[in-house]
Amino acid sequence: MTRRTTKRVFGTVVAAGAVIAGLVTVQAVRTGAQPATTLVRGNVAGEWRYWGADAWSSRYSPLDQINASNFDSLKVAWTWNAGAFGKDEYYRTTPIFANGRLFTVATTRRVTAALDPSNGETLWMYRLDEGIRWQKAPRQFAGRGLSYWTDGRSERVLTVTPGYHLVSLDAKTGRPDPLFGKNGVVDLMDGLGYPMVPLAVDDSGPLIISDAAPMRKAKLGEKWDPVKKIGADGTIGIDPAAGQIAASSPPIVVGNVLIVGNSSIHGYYPIRAHNVPGTIRGFDIRTGRQLWKFNLVPQPGEYGADTWKNGSKPGTKGVGKNDAWAPYAADPELGIVYIPVGMPLMDEYGGHRPGNNLYGNSLVALDAKTGVRKWHFQMVHHDIWDYDTPMSPNLMDITVDGKRRKVVAQTTKQGWVYTFDRVTGEPIWPMPETPVMKSDVPGEQSSPTQPIPSKPAPYSQQGLVEADLIDYTPAIRDSALKMAKKCRMGPYFIPPAAADGKGSTGLRCSWYAPGASGGVNIDGGAAVDPESGMLFVASITGMSTAQVQKDPCSEFDYSSPRDSCGLLGALPAPAGYQKPASGDRGGDFGARSAGSMIGGVSIVKPKQYGGITAYNMNTGDKSWWIPNGGMQKITSRDPLFAGVTLPEQSARGQAQAMNTKSLMIYGTGRGGGAPGSAPTLFAVDKSTGKQVGALKIESRTTAVPMTFMHMGKQYIVFATGSEENTGLTALTLPRK
């Protein structure tokens, strides 16, 4: 094999030689269903050109070579070792397939690679050398994927690096496009309105490289000051005093415009009450020239600025984050891009940012060419629950009351599907502003109402009330009730409590559901069947324990007890109450809501924890529900449960689903499936939810699977693994 390495100022390309070049000749797409040139929702039949399959983020392919009759016959065609390029917390990437090549990113360095889809051989790879810029970058994990563009002659692969550079690469060779930006690279920190300064090395303590990295554990009473010495590579960026900004999802292509969002620091770690506000920007796909910018924190004179009562200028206390870190969706025909927006700082306290805080927790529709707002809807006012919008919206064409409607459906941590006319933003079904419980944390000004969808019915449990408690015997019910009354409960949107008990109720904690982990979160989300109008939502039912506390090491009046002065869980627990585990922010009822277990049994009746809910979106009604990988038995040795036969409950974790013409295919996700069961890829009948196939795999899926057709064969590809054991696995049918 011939290889050549080309050194560049901004990065390194490893390109294949003449032999490999012959292998990547564009192949005709053979689907047997539609011509290869037929565009379907911005995609080509048999390909997977976007993170979510197409611009609509449908996670759907019309392929049907793999079906119920042969699913269990699938064999491993190849595996690709992403860990060869470095470690990653876990592999979150869904590859894309276009014009005969598979493209992916890997590791915290976000290495970009092209693969031969027949055998998984690396055709080329590229890594931008970011030096200290990378070391200081938040959200370094693999960014979920990348983007593809072609005008029929040129082909480009586009990615955003951990250090917030936009890179355009020739899809055939992996070389940076010399006509794009500066040698193929656009510095995304430039153009945000902040001065660019030399970055510095923080040599005052060890760095923790993780999901929230880099973060140094502070000492009690220490004030954050990362600047120690100028980096030897002379890397420049935004002064860390202003905050951090990055991207954790791929950009999206709409025509000849590339739309790029941002992510920033986690909202449960900050010690400063401001950060770089989020922005959405459009770039010319050929040149990298910035075309427009949309402020996710409206600036003075812009629509929504009055929803920030203390002011919305950058650097203002409370202004920052409000990032749109999830993948986006778009309607190429309408020229609209749909942006799911996260929440402002901090996650569980907002006394420093009074007002509804637009465009936090909103779905925002923008004109893709100009960046002008078409419409928006805020799903959570003044968020204090960490209900950031974690997944891409799904576009659908459905028939409601006999009328054909173009809709966009947004799944959420709240456990609801918010459904809108994607042209006007009008809710398809009413979402009345509904009174909710008022916060009693000193200084907090929570919203008195929240919009509650009337349809579809929620896919996760809403709230915790006495009727939800286990009552197998009177003694069990009394024990559960005694434990539950230590925290505030209610139907939904239960605000956090002050850990010092200085609120009006005197309670030191709250339980709210769905919790900070969802509902739907980063690993779940929905897949669409465009032929039937079905929506399949992979979710969990979770409950979080919510407290805020005085924090002497931050600029917030209150902050999460899970991060006091950088030392997770520093304050003593309330009397008689088990404090949340270190770093734990809520997930399923039994395992992650501290103080909610008796003898290893959740005080909450078994619910549909991890599973997939199918909705007929033409009517807004539930069609079926299935557990994520099966059910599990509950047992306890506590004498309180002697003689009691406990019911089964569904397995934990968020499934990761996609659709083909006849099947819904899902992996259980890294935390899913019945305990002790082997990692499995499942196939179910879309109309009934009945399992029609189950295939044992080497490791659990860690991202949404994808499928494509190449050289007459259909493949299914999915990511697995953690640390240095990350990679892709490709399945296909054996040749007859």
Image (cartoon, helix red, strand yellow):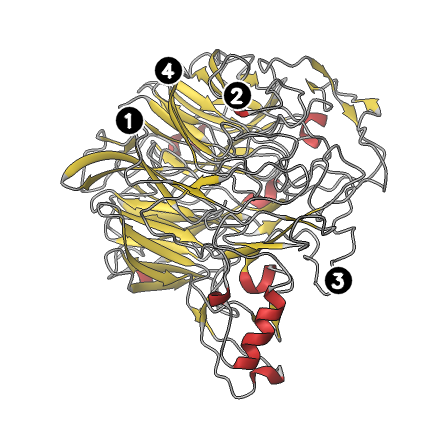
Q: CA distance from mark 1 to mark 2?
A: 26 Å
Question: Left or right: 400 with respect to 48?
Answer: left
Q: Position of residue 468 (x, y in %)?
A: 48, 66
Q: CA distance from mark 4 to mark 3?
A: 57 Å
> In which image quadrant can residue 694 be found?
bottom left
* 457 and 180: which is toward the camera: 457
Which labelled disc corresponds to residue 369?
4
- Mark 1, Cα crowd under 10 Å, few <14 / some 14-19 / many 20+, is some
Question: Left or right: 496 with respect to 552?
Answer: left
Q: CA distance from mark 4 to mark 2?
A: 27 Å
Q: CA distance from mark 2 to mark 3?
A: 41 Å
Q: Earlier in the sequence, mark 4 or mark 2?
A: 2
The residue depicted at 42 percent of the width and 43 percent of the height is: 434
Considering only vertical position in the picture, is 573 above or below 214?
below
Q: CA distance from mark 1 to mark 4?
A: 16 Å
Asked whether the residues under the numbered discs 4 and 3 touch, taking CB atoms below 8 Å apart as contact, a structural biologist would say: no
Amino acid under disc 4: Lys
- Mark 2, Cα crowd under 10 Å, few <14 / some 14-19 / many 20+, is some
Q: Which residue is mark 1?
A: 423
Q: Earlier in the sequence, mark 1 or mark 2?
A: 2
The reply to whether residue 700 is in sight is no
**Dot 1: element:** loop
Image quarter hosting the C terminus: bottom left
> In which image quadrant can residue 229 be found?
top right
Q: Which residue is mark 3?
A: 575
**Camera-nearest label, 1 or 2:** 2
> In which image quadrant can residue 286 be found?
top left
Q: How many marks?
A: 4
Amino acid under disc 2: Asp
- Mark 4, Cα crowd under 10 Å, few <14 / some 14-19 / many 20+, is many
